[in-house]
Amino acid sequence: MPTYVYEPCAGGCDKCGGQFEINRPIDREPLTQCPLCKVPVRKVFAGFNTPPNKAKPLSVVDAKKAGFTVLKKIGKGEYEKQ
C-alpha cells in the first residue's frame, strides 16, 4: 500500500501537526478532510523510497557477457565496437 502525504489547505493544526502521512490503497479516492481535525486537506507530492542498489556498476566485460554491443567514442559522432 502506498503512503500519501497530506497537508491542510489553509493554516495548521495541533492534532495532525500541519502535515500527515497515511497508507491507503491506490483505488481509494484521495482524502478531503483530516481524519483527526476534519480540516480540508490536499495531497502533497512527496519522495518515494527505492531499495538501495546493491549491485556493482556494469563493466564493459559484464555488458558484453549480457549480450550488449559496447561502443567507444572515437570522434565527434563516430563510434566503433569495442
Image (cartoon, rainbow, N blue to C red):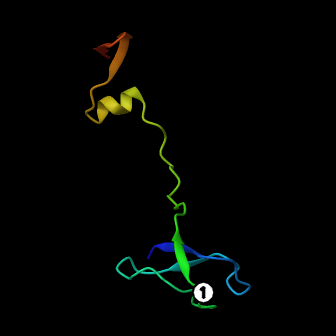
Quadrant assignment, res 6:
bottom right
Amino acid type assigned to the residue bearing label 1 in the image: Val
**Within 10 angstroms of label 1, few (less than 14), some, or many (20 or more) residues?**
some
Location of residue 32 in the rendering, given as x and y in whole percent from the top left corner: 49, 83
Count of number-bearing discs: 1
Instruction: Farthest residue to the top: give it.
Output: 75
Q: Nearer the viewer, residue 3 or 57?
A: 3
Disc 1: which residue: 39
Quarter placement of the C terminus: top left
Residue drawn at the location 39% of the way across and 82% of the way down: 29
Residue 62 position within the rendered picture, expressed as x and y whole percent measured from the top left: 37, 33
Quarter the N terminus occupies: bottom left
Q: Residue 72, image x and y in percent? A: 36, 17
Up-down relation of residue 42 to residue 65 (above or below) = below
Residue drawn at (37%, 14%) of the image: 73
Please indicate whether residue 58 sits to the left or right of residue 10 in the image.
Answer: left
Camera-nearest residue between 64 and 79: 79
Horizontal and vertical percent position of residue 45: 52, 64
Element under label 1?
loop
Image-based side of 43 in relation to 20, left or right: left
Q: Is residue 14 left or right of residue 33?
A: right
Up-down: is 48 above or below 79?
Answer: below
Residue 13 horizontal side relative to residue 75, left or right: right
Indicate the quadrant where residue 64 lies: top left
Residue at coordinates 70% horizontally, 83% vertically from top-left? 13
